[in-house]
Image (cartoon, grey):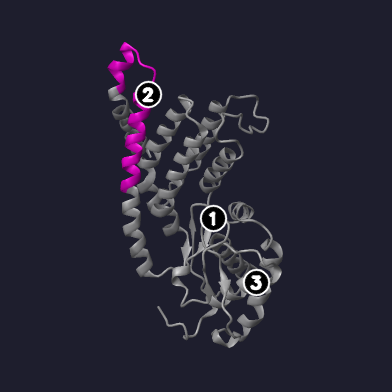
Amino acid sequence: MPQEDSQFGEPEFLGWLLLKRLKEQSDDQISRSKFLKLCCITDRHLAESHEYEVGLPRYWYMYGELANEHEFSGRFYNAPLAIGWDGQQYIPKELPVDAFEVSEAGLEVIPDAVDWTVREFGRKNVEEIKQHQYEEYAENEFIRQYSELRWLLSTIDLGRQERLQNYGSGGESNEEFLKRQLDEMMAAYPGDEERYEEMKTLYFRWDDTIRLMVDQSTEYSRIAEFLDDFILVLSKEVLRFVYNQNISEERLIDWEEDAAEEREEFTTNLKDVRSELLQDRPRSTELDRVSDAYSQTVDEQIERLLGRE
């Protein structure tokens, strides 16, 4: 990594100026997630409104798009522990503008884009920023669908089995509603990209398992957690590889190793959850006879579905 006294480029200038403007607007602490998301929004605004590219490294992850801060050349900010919540707060360093290597055009359009971002999103919280990213920038319908399901689960008291917000869906039960949401996710699953294809069998097994949870009236808090487990492995295995820009080859190699570890851990956890759910099903003589074959039957059905595509 370059030394502290090295020159910074345009991605760093965008991030540094963004932090400065946010601090000028409010002295509130700036979280890592808010900073990295607003860098992406600023970069997109630059490209869409000014047709200007700074080369910001960014990628899609669990709950929106993030700048990859590990690829910024050097440190143009301090990141001490936040006060009042876990995590870090981001504070711009005192630097002269000429510490950054920026073109004349960049000196004109980057501040305009930063000012727009701060004006539109500076006082919004991370959840509002995340929602904007899903609505405006999600790469496909499947990403929007899992975001919608997660949002629906977050709108209730997860410690109680309250009625979900079914939006006038004809009075269907929570179980019917959740399964319909899962059906819509399944229908939207992308089939035209290799990494999604490689993930499909694991996704089908996860889908079947979460339906078992719904059938057994598992607490919504656990369903929400299991959804997050899947989105995490999807992010590490698929999303950050398929939807990124300006990510170095070295970083992609690191991600491949991380993805393999995450997939192995998720696969083990999935098997454990399925076993637990099957053991907890109401038992009868007939169930005793067939339950041991349940997972094998589901796997065979999944393989047949994959084979017909």
- The residue labelled by disc 2 is 280
Lower position in the chain sequence, tag 2 or tag 3: 3
Q: Position of residue 91 (x, y in %)?
A: 57, 71
Report, in whole angstroms, how far the alpha carbon at label 2 lies from the one at label 3. Answer: 54 Å
Q: Is residue 97 above or below residue 172?
A: below
Q: Position of residue 169 (x, y in %)?
A: 64, 29
Judge from the rendering whether residue 295 lies leftward or rightward of residue 22; answer left or right: left
Segment colored magenta: 264-291
Q: Is residue 278 magenta?
A: yes
Q: What numbered label is drawn on residue 114? A: 3
For this rendering, which residue is in front, 91 or 104? 91
Q: Quadrant of the N terminus?
A: bottom left
Residue sticking out furthest to the front: 84
Lower position in the chain sequence, tag 1 or tag 3: 1
* Residue pictured at 66% horizontal, 72% vertical: 21
For this rendering, which residue is in front, 193 or 201? 201
Amino acid type, callout 2: Asp
- The residue labelled by disc 1 is 64
